[in-house]
Image: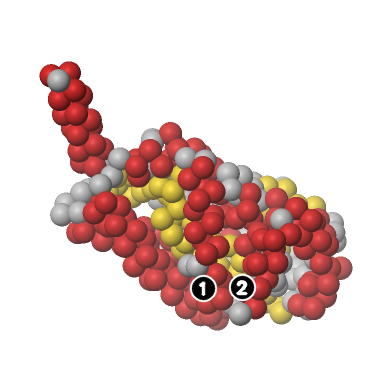
Amino acid sequence: MKTLITALVATTALAGATQAQEVTFAHGSNPGNPRFVAAETWAELFTECTDGQSVNVAPSATMGDDVEMLTSATAGVINVTANSQGAMSQIVPEIALLGLPFLFEDLETAWSVLDGEVGEMLDTRAQDAGLKILGFWDNGIRHISHVSKTVPTPDDISGMKIRTPPDTMTVDIFEALGAAPAPLAFSELPTALQSGTFDGQENPLVNIYSSNIHEITPYITLTGHKYESTPVVAGLAWWSGLDDATKQCALDATQQAGEEQRQMVADQSESLVTTMEEEGVTFEEADREAYIEATRSVYDKYSEEYPDLVEALRDAASN
């Protein structure tokens, strides 16, 4: 009996220590990016809700790139990361389907899908891999920027050396368009563009501006070719050691900070065109129908691999 009591006391003490330690929330965004702002808000909300639990927010990829942060969360080195859909797709392949070309008409439709059964399914898959999805923030509708020209039609992109995130879906889209895509960590992108490794890249306007990529690639084509989320992910081992009240604090902080983050992305997506034009950026609208037609083969590929999920996503996105 004494041994059992000792073990119970030790277990309780360990759980308490798990919750008392400073929480590390890591992400890859720079000041001014909605993800950066939302992470600071998350920390404030979580600390208030837990009556003083401290949070160390580590921005700007100081804890590694997105893939490294996910690995660190699984290993318990960090606790939470506002990460990327591309990196997450290496752990939960189905999350890449959110980036099917031209799937979502607007941001609000994407949010509605993520906040429903699709988001729950992806969380279940993530937990199988040692991660807990606390919620989905936004990483915007993506557009193409180039060092020397706009690319209004697929013909204009033929042969283009373009950086993509580590996401098979994005690579497939640009291969279908006849470009030469190659994955690279976002933190390494400005240097790679300046060195001439790439002709351009694709990102939402918010990321392009907050990282000063528009200064290197001042020609932006508003393609709107795909959507990407920002999954907010906790290490499952850390998550499992929390009591129910603390778990709810983390979920509530993610949801509340996410509302702010999503709205910032939506607002900046509209205002940044004017801002960047004033700073010398040239914009052009893409021939959307031509791009849609050129990327139909991407749907064929993923419909063969995930027929039910692709159909469910298309249905959800159209409702």
Which residue sits at x=51%, y=80%? 271
Q: Which residue is mark 1?
A: 112
Of badges 2 and 1, nearer the viewer stands 2
Q: Eyeballing the image, is 43 above or below 116?
A: above
Judging depth in this view, the residue of 60 and 42 nearest the camera is: 42
- Give how far across and how far down residue 232 sits, in percent: 44, 55
Q: How many marks?
A: 2
Looking at the rendered structure, the secondary structure element under dot 2 is helix
Q: Residue furthest top?
A: 3
2 and 1 marks in contact (CB < 8 Å): yes
Judging depth in this view, the residue of 299 and 273 nearest the camera is: 299
Q: Which residue is mark 2?
A: 316
Looking at the rendered structure, the secondary structure element under dot 1 is helix
Quadrant of res 5: top left
User: Can residue 282 be seen by looking at this rendering?
Assistant: no
Left-right relation of 14 to 284: left
Judging depth in this view, the residue of 315 and 190 nearest the camera is: 315
Disc 2 crowd, CA 10 A, few/some/many (<14, 14-19, 20+): some
- Give how far across and how far down residue 57 sits, in percent: 33, 50
Q: Which amino acid is tagged 1?
A: Ser
Which residue sits at x=16%, y=29%? 9
| First in sequence: mark 2 vs mark 1 | 1
Which residue sits at x=19%, y=23%? 4
Q: Which amino acid is tagged 2?
A: Ala
Q: Where is the N terminus found, in terms of image quarters?
A: top left
Which residue sits at x=43%, y=75%? 263
User: Can residue 49 be seen by looking at this rendering?
Assistant: yes
Q: Residue furthest left?
A: 2
